Image: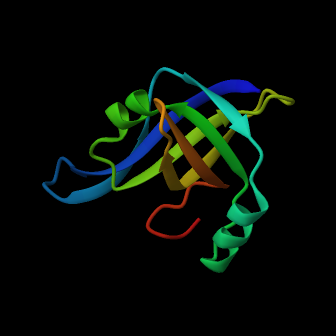
Amino acid sequence: MYTEIFLGKQEVETNEFGEKEKVITFSPESLFCEEKSVRYSEFYQAMQTGMKAEKQVLMNKYEYKGYMRSALRKFAKIRDSYTDEIIEYTIFREYEKDDDTIELTLTRGVEQNGSS
């Protein structure tokens, strides 16, 4: 099933006082991605590291890498296919396929500075 995705990234920016701070920004335009079910092996591997694999998506790797170049941490907002609600996720695994796609594994919530 295809749905919309908004990519987000955490970067270090300098504020008006000259202090460096971490800021999360999301892409203004949406891209399309294909939602996939999380495989059992992926789910259990994530559990071993303390994460919960809740969603996997496939998208064009060049669109993804173009936006995420300078990201410290990576995030996504995805439109739920059933409720039309936009849900925020943290991207914790990327896997480049042989074709022009990248598979992203996500956990619900935006974790800033390592906590949700």
Choose top left, top right, bottom left or bottom right for residue 81. Answer: top right
Q: Residue pushed farthest right?
A: 82
Q: Residue at x 43, y 67 (%)?
A: 113
Q: Position of residue 18 (x, y in %)?
A: 13, 55
Choose top left, top right, bottom left or bottom right for residue 21. Answer: bottom left
Say left or right for 46 vs 39.
left
Choose top left, top right, bottom left or bottom right for residue 49. Answer: bottom right
Question: Which of the image's four quarters has the C terminus?
Answer: bottom right
Residue 42, placed above or below residue 75: below
Q: Position of residue 58 (x, y in %)?
A: 60, 36
Instruction: Give the camera-side residue of 36 and 77.
Output: 36
Q: Position of residue 69 (x, y in %)?
A: 29, 41
Residue 27, placed above or below residue 57: above
Q: Residue at x 61, y 52 (%)?
A: 105
Residue 8, placed above or below residue 12: above
Instruction: Give the camera-side residue of 115 and 44.
Output: 44
Say left or right for 100 vs 54.
left
Instruction: Give the camera-side residue of 13 and 94.
Output: 94
Question: Which of the image's four quarters has the N terminus?
Answer: top right
Q: Position of residue 45 (x, y in %)?
A: 66, 71
Instruction: Give the camera-side residue of 5 and 11.
Output: 5
Q: How is the model colour-coded?
A: rainbow
Say left or right for 74 vs 81.
left
Q: Residue pushed farthest left?
A: 18
Q: Residue at x 78, y 62 (%)?
A: 40
Number of marks in the rendered image? 0
